[in-house]
Image (spheres, coloured by chain):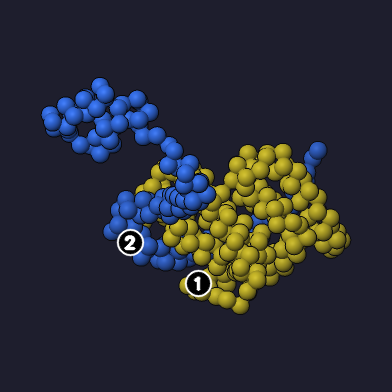
Amino acid sequence: MIDERTDLNPLELDPERGASLIDAILARGEPILARYAERGPLVIVAGWLRPALAAAAIVAGVAIGALLAARPDEAAAVPTTAEALGFPGPVAAWAEAGHTPSLEELVISLEEAAQ
Amino acid sequence: MTMSGSDRELVAEALRGRTEAFAALVERYLRPAYSVALARTGDPHDAEDVVQDAFVVALERLAECREPDRFAGWLFEIVRNRGLNYVRARTVRQTAPLDDVTAAAQGGPELDTERAALRESLLGALEELSPVQREVILLHDLEGWRHAEIAERLGFAEGTARFHLHQARRAMRERLAPRYAAENRR
């Protein structure tokens, strides 16, 4: 398959007009580049941030929707980590609350467990 | 003085505000971008305005260029969109005026007239092609890009680039045949 090509050179961008075009583009780009130089890496972060925020908003929307759709009694039935590990009631409550029990509280809880 | 380096490096440097890096990108892709703009607008002056606008828009949105290695493809997309807007509203002109240097083209007024007539014929023939065919034939036959480059930057298979070029060349020959026949008779 031999293609005879047409001479398209008359459509070429005139070199002088090309040079003027470059000058015009650079002149218009100058304030933008100056802004980039001032902001530094923040420009790149800003570019990433927009789509990242959009993605986060979608995830949050889906998550909130799923939480609202879930029935409250089902949510209440989910055991805490301490309960799932089989700790006695008071110990599980302290673990969840991040509370350090006193000696007295430990004794009482042991007595209750023994009964 | 402009910089050299990969598109990725130049994009990164331009984002740090380095004029030389942006100038290198402009010099590297001005002519191909002009070809894409010409393919979309069909008018050399509009194509110049489109290219100017597109580079400025590209610089403004440079941080959004996800794949800096494919800067050209991303830029061409902006050129196409701007070109489309220009075709829709040809009267809108917001670009900085260029000095009128075409009149000073080499070869004297006679050659200018002949060249201008030939240019009009070529533009008329290009109009018969699809926008993609116009882009492919201009990038290949005017800019000297290879099929692989065209395929990568326009986002299709190499075979598709070959097919478009073949179709475009055939259509151009058919359209321009009467003109060349008349010239040969002279």
Q: Outermost residue, left direction? A: A103
Quadrant in the picture for residue B112 = bottom right
Q: Marks 1/2: CA distance?
A: 21 Å
Q: Outermost residue, top direction? A: A114
The colour applied to the residues of chain B in this rendering is: yellow
Indicate left or right for A97 with B172 as reference.
left
Q: Outermost residue, bottom direction? A: B91
The chain in blue: A
Quadrant in the picture for the C terminus of chain A: top left
x and y, in percent, of residue B175 in the image:
82, 59
Residue on which the image places disc 2: A35
x and y, in percent, of residue A18 in the image:
52, 61
**Compared with residue A96, is residue B82 higher up or lower down, i.e. above or below?**
below
* Residue at the (57%, 76%) spot, across then down: B92
Same chain for the residues under marks 1 and 2 in the image: no
Residue on which the image places disc 1: B95
Question: Which of labels 1 and 2 is toward the front?
Answer: 2
Indicate left or right for B58 with B162 as reference.
left
User: What amino acid type is highlighted by mark number 1?
Assistant: Thr
* Residue at the (46%, 47%) spot, across then down: A72
User: What amino acid type is highlighted by mark number 2?
Assistant: Arg
